[in-house]
Image (cartoon, helix red, strand yellow):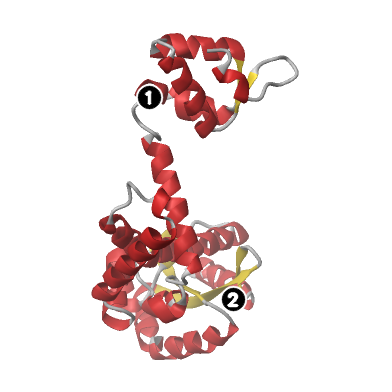
Amino acid sequence: MIRQLSKFKKNDEGMYILYDRFTFDNFFKILLKNSLEHNDALDFIMTNCSLSCLIFQERIENKNYLGLSTEKAISDDLLKLKNETLFEIITNRFQFNYSRNVGKVSEEIRKCSPKTIADWEQYYYQNVRSKLHLIELGRRLYTKITEVLQAEIENITEQDCISYIITLVIKRTFDGYTSEKQTVYGQLQDILGVKIEPAPDEWDRLHNIDFYIKVKNKFIGLQIKPAGGVSHITQIYQERTQQAETHKKFTAKYGGKVFYIISIKAGDKKVIHNTEVIDEIKDEIQRLQNLN
């Protein structure tokens, strides 16, 4: 057995280095092939190996080592990781995620301004590409994988590819969009030093309000609009003009003004583009606080 383990690197203390799951699993399987039971194999590793936090978390503490077998070429979690990596490589290589194939999703989701993933999915299928189109992209992805990486796709199905394409276009775009709104919302709350709360669905439908600030018995409305770039800001201001009447109704009913907060990407961060709105909101908060 020691001879079989000689291919694994050791540190200065003579301990086998098992810092990633692939290496750990291969080492563990050698122990199993030499008639050690799972717990005995673990005891050997704890005594003779240097382990990373990842191994403790993903193999030992959650007892995933008990599921390792000499009959399985790769563990389930690593198979999923391998497939995901493979999907991304082939999708990027053959440009299945380019706008000519899936549309300009960053721009389209901002036009849609969805509250739920179902809103975004319905909008996408009706206005950008059909679900049948994404299914066809998934089938083309499957064909490319089977042609280009035949040896790596024994466990990938056509349905895996279809699901990946749909998740990529629908769920991940939506998750990125909602994350952007929450990031700006958090920045604004810290700057103003007041509690900002999500608006009820009724306010969203009737008044186009995303969040609100309560001041005494009055409410200030906020609408956060992520912009894909400077060119998209003009469109946002056009939307603002179209929604002006619903905002007037909100002010008449709840006492506070409605403000547009435009977010743009600056490097890896989302920031407030129209920073002048911050002082305007502060002034409105002060005005409402001074009311009898």
> For residue 277, which numbered disc appears in the image?
2
What count of labels does the image hold? Answer: 2
> Are the residues tagged 1 and 2 within 8 Å (C-beta)?
no
- Mark 2 Cα shell of 10 Å, populated few (<14), some (14-19), many (≥20): some
The residue tagged with tag 2: helix, strand or loop?
Answer: helix
Give how far across and how far down residue 200 sits, in percent: 31, 64
Which mark is nearer the camera, 1 or 2?
1
Viewer-nearest residue: 61 or 149:
149
> In the picture provided, is 63 more to the left or to the right than 262?
left
Give how far across and how far down residue 120 sits, in percent: 32, 70
Give how far across and how far down residue 86 sits, in percent: 45, 54
Q: State whether residue 117 is above or below residue 229.
A: above
Disc 1 marks a residue whose amino acid type is Thr
> In the picture provided, is 263 more to the left or to the right than 29?
right
Query: Residue at image x 31%, y 83%?
Result: 127
Disc 2 marks a residue whose amino acid type is Val
Check disc 1 and report the residue beneath it: 70
> For residue 147, which numbered disc appears in the image?
none
Query: Residue at image x 57%, y 28%?
Result: 53
| Separation of residues labelled 1 and 2 (CA atoms) | 63 Å
> In the picture provided, is 119 more to the left or to the right than 38?
left
Query: Which tag, 1 or 2, sits closer to the chain's start?
Result: 1
Give how far across and how far down residue 75 sits, in percent: 39, 34
Query: Residue at image x 50%, y 64%?
Result: 180
Farthest left residue in view: 132
- Mark 1 Cα shell of 10 Å, populated few (<14), some (14-19), many (≥20): some
Residue 149, visible in the rendered structure:
yes
The residue tagged with tag 1: helix, strand or loop?
Answer: loop
Residue 215, visible in the rendered structure:
no
